[in-house]
Image: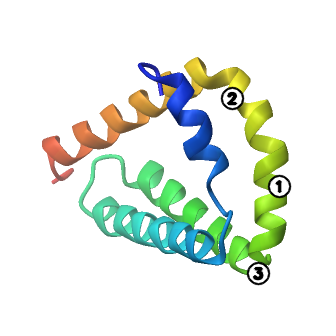
Amino acid sequence: MLSRPARIHGFLLGFADSALKHYAELLVRLLVGSSLLLVARESAYSSVLSAFGWLLIITTALMALIPWRVHHRFTQSAVPKALRFLPLIGIASLTVAAFLLQTIVTGSSS
C-alpha cells in the first residue's frame, strides 16, 4: 500500500466484481476471524483478539446475506473515497500486523 499505491487501486476495486471473489473474501474473513478466536485463548491480549475475531465473523455473516452485486456496487463507491486515506490505512495495517506478530511471538499469558 505504501510503496506502490497505484497498484493497490486496481486490487481494491477488483473485490466483489464476481460472485467467486465475493465468496472467497467471505471465506478468508471467516478463517481469519476464527483463527483469531483460537489464538486469543492463549494470548495475553485475549479480549482484543476475541473482539476483533468476533467483529470479523459477525460482519462476514452480515455480508453473506448481501448479494455480491450489492457488495460490488458498494465497493465501487466506497473504495475511491477510502483511497484518499491510503497512507493512513497503510500505517494502520502495518501497526495491526506488528501487533499480531508480537502477540504470536510472545506466546501465551500463562
Kind of residue sitting beneath label 3 = Leu
Which residue position holds label 1? 74
Where is residue 23, by image quadrant? Answer: bottom right
Residue ID for mark 3 = 65
What colouring does the structure picture have?
A: rainbow
Residue in the picture at 27% in, 53% down: 43
Mark identifier at residue 88: none
Using the image, determine if residue 53 lies above or below residue 105.
below
**Residue at mark 2:** 83
* Amino acid found under the numbered disc labelled 2: Leu
Alpha carbons under labels 2 and 1: distance apart: 14 Å
**Amino acid under label 1?**
Phe
Identify the secondary structure beneath mark 2: helix
Q: CA distance from mark 3 to mark 1?
A: 14 Å
Relative horizontal placement of residue 54, taking residue 39 as reference (left or right): right
The image position of residue 37, as x and y in percent, is 39, 67
The local crowd at label 1, few if under 14, some if 14 to 19, many if 20 or more residues have their Cα within 10 Å, is: few
